[in-house]
């Protein structure tokens, strides 16, 4: 029986607003992977061009993640090294990546999440409210959800 060489799936945070707000490690990973999955390939192309990174880029977003899931996992099981990025911030936080992370864990593919840009941490720290304990409820996509949340929790 031959030895299997598993790939690795890496979640790479991208800058929120300023292209300089990316870690050196994130740039290094994006230069080394076989494939970069992107929420919006146009947005990611801008980032990659800025750092002179030329790697294959494939769309990965809420409209195709179920459809491409098993194909991507198959590639990882064959030894591919993949990164996923979102338009801004950390993949998997109210952005695509959860399904692929869960499936990778299920089949034994190594998953790594780099530290880096997140939207809610700077917002929390800048708010002036106590940070020793907080609850992140996700990002609201539409005003109606905000109204429902406010009504359900008594918070505005």
Image: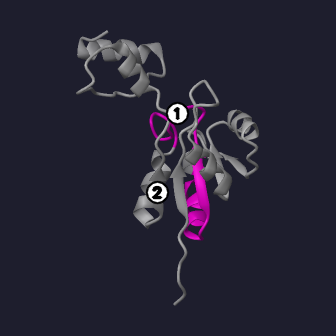
The figure's colour scheme reads one colour
Q: Residue at x 55, y 87 (%)?
A: 2
Horizontal relation, residue 99 to residue 78: left or right: left
Q: Nearer the viewer, residue 155 or 129?
A: 129
In magenta segment, residue 150: no
Query: Can you tell which mark lies on residue 134?
Result: none
Horizontal relation, residue 78 to residue 117: left or right: right
In magenta segment, residue 88: yes
* Residue sticking out furthest to the top: 156
Q: Residue at x 41, y 60 (%)?
A: 105
SS class, disc 2:
strand
The answer to which of marks 2 and 1 sits earlier in the sequence is: 1
Magenta stretch: give its range. 67-96
Q: Nearer the viewer, residue 31 or 59?
A: 31
Is disc 2 in contact with disc 1, using a CB cutoff of under 8 Å? no
Horizontal relation, residue 56 to residue 108: left or right: right
Query: Eyeballing the image, is 104 above or below 79?
Result: above
Q: Residue at x 46, y 42 (%)?
A: 115
Q: Are there few (<14), some (14-19), or many (20+) residues within 10 Å of tag 2?
A: some
Quarter placement of the C terminus: top left
SS class, disc 1:
loop
Q: Which residue is mark 1?
A: 89
State which quadrant residue 49 falls in: top right
Q: Which residue is mark 2?
A: 111
């Amino acid at each position: 029986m031959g030895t299997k060489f598993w790939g690795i799936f890496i979640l790479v945070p991208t800058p929120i607003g300023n292209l300089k707000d990316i870690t050196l490690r994130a740039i290094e990973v994006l230069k080394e992977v076989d494939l970069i999955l992107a929420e919006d390939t146009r947005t990611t192309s801008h980032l990659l061009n800025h750092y002179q990174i030329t790697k294959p880029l494939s769309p990965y977003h809420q409209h195709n993640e179920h459809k491409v899931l098993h194909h991507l996992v198959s590639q990882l099981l064959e030894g591919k090294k993949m990164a996923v990025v979102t338009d801004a911030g950390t993949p998997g936080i109210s952005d695509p990546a959860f399904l692929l992370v869960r499936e990778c864990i299920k089949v034994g593919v190594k998953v790594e999440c780099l530290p880096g840009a997140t939207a809610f941490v700077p917002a929390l720290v800048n708010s002036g409210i106590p940070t020793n304990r907080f609850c992140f409820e996700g990002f609201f996509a539409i005003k109606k959800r905000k109204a429902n949340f406010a009504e359900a929790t008594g918070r505005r």
